[in-house]
Image: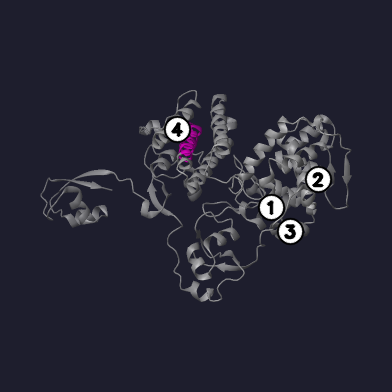
Amino acid sequence: MNNIKYFSFILLSFVYLQDLDTTNSLDFTYEPLSASDSLEFQENNLFEQLLNESKLFYADAIISDLKGDTLNTLYYFDNLFKALAQLEEISKNVPEIAKVKYQNILSASIEYYDNKVSSVDHTKSGLSTAVFKDKLEEYIYNQNLYDIIDIEETVEIIEGHVPITYNKQVASIIKYYQNQGRPYIKQWLNREDKFKQIILPILKEEGLPPEIFYVAMVESGLKTDAKSYASAVGPWQFIASTAKSFDLEKNYYIDERRDIEKSTRAAAKYLKRLHKQFGDWYLAFAAYNCGETRVQRHINYFNTRNFWELKNLPKETQNYIPSILAIIFISKNPEKYNFKVNPDPHFEWETIEINKSVKIKDIAKCSGISQKILKQYNSELLRDIVYVNGNKPYMFKMPIGYNPDFDSLFALIPESKSEGTYIISHKVKSGESYWLLATRHNTTITAICELNNLDRNKPLRMGKIIKIPVGDKSKYKKQLTKHIYKVKRGDSLSRIAVKYKIKVSKIKKWNNLKSDFIKIGQKLIIYK
């Protein structure tokens, strides 16, 4: 009976998903494309490719959740929102009907993740802050500030600090933090001291007010793996383009947006620049949230530099500064707001040089520190490997208290030839697209592009050799092509095997041969 309910729900989910697309242009059934059709699809329909990818991830996420498979649920949602991030980037230049498709799948994904995912603790996942912000937006939208007791606005001004304002908007968000948002805020407060020890010295070094720390708190809940529904990542929620402009590296192996120190230095430089431009911290924060051009346009239109008078800013931005101020008030006096803080242990590490590519599990064996903790300290790592390319060593954060014999044990570890996941080389054939290759090898367009430093907006060139990440080698089944070989004079099984770079035993198995004897004109099946 439970199985019937389960598969009925899956079927309904697929139907629901299909209904999102009013044009019925996409389907879950894979249909082979001709070379010409595929090339046209690749060049002109990238948006449709990504939408297809998003739908597949959405379906896989639902199935994993219903099975209670937390890890896979998070994996598929992570990839789903990566695909949606790419859709967001290119949605500006697509027809209105395509934008509707994108908004539909985005809304469906958020709604399912927020309300129906049963196997994930939202407060602990990388998407927790995105969910929290979405709920806060809904709360604020439904609030009538006039119902709040009139509060005389007071401002705490300390030279060199951010002014601390208390008004109706701030009071309303404090109320939300105390009630619906309580599970999230508790964890934020527990993480506070742990992150202050890293962030505050950097802010001081950059000559910035300590209150800027709370920007990161509101942006990410102080989670290094925090991500928005679209494209922002890390404790300071950098989008890819902004991160690049502040020299934060992102590739297949690392994402420096997730590194506490590096992302804080980038955020400090960015906020310092914004404050110099606007001469006001509230306006600088608003620009950090929605962009300096938009903020400047509103300043010019309303002829005011008072943030509270810029009424037409995006709803998220209007709530952004009150949210920062609200958490400052709670942080200064948590007991007053009925919060009990249980501080997380501080980060304590020394930096060591890693001069060879090595799996994190091998570092764990040598150090006596678990893989989980090592990855927490080195949060920029995206794979289960420290990948060293060339002569530049990787600066690895090693928790204090590791095995004193680490150096001698580590020297015995051979350099890893694996790159953290099984990777194959593939020569691009006519008609092949990113989407076709990703689908065929059970990977993502994003992973292929990141590994090869390719622009997904440009078509693949026929004949180009690319790397494709296909996951666990033990689970990977190569997609083989069937060939018919006609035996010629002078041929032998060993000679044919050398020609195709395969084993004689495989040829015999494929052709049900009992001996090595073959004759001229005989047709052999070869898989390659």
Mark 4 or mark 3, which is nearer to you?
Answer: 4
Does the CB distance between marks 4 and 3 fall below 8 Å? no
**Measured along the vertical axis of the image, is residue 309 above or below residue 127?**
above
Mark with earlier residue (2, 1): 1
Amino acid type, callout 2: Trp
In the rendered image, which residue does mark 2 sit on?
281
Q: Residue 202 got which mark?
A: 3
Mark 1 or mark 3, which is nearer to you?
Answer: 3
Amino acid type, callout 4: Phe
Tell me the magenta residue range: 44-62
Mark with earlier residue (4, 3): 4
In the rendered image, which residue does mark 1 sit on?
266
**Measured along the vertical axis of the image, is residue 490 above or below residue 88?**
below
x, y percent for residue 138: 68, 33
In the rendered image, which residue does mark 4 sit on?
9
Distance in Å between CA atoms under marks 4 and 3: 51 Å
Does the CB distance between marks 2 and 4 fall below 8 Å? no
Q: Secondary structure at mark 2?
A: helix
Distance in Å between CA atoms under marks 3 and 2: 18 Å
Distance in Å between CA atoms under marks 2 and 4: 50 Å
x, y percent for residue 93: 58, 30
Dot 1, crowdedness within 10 Å: few (<14), some or many (≥20)? many
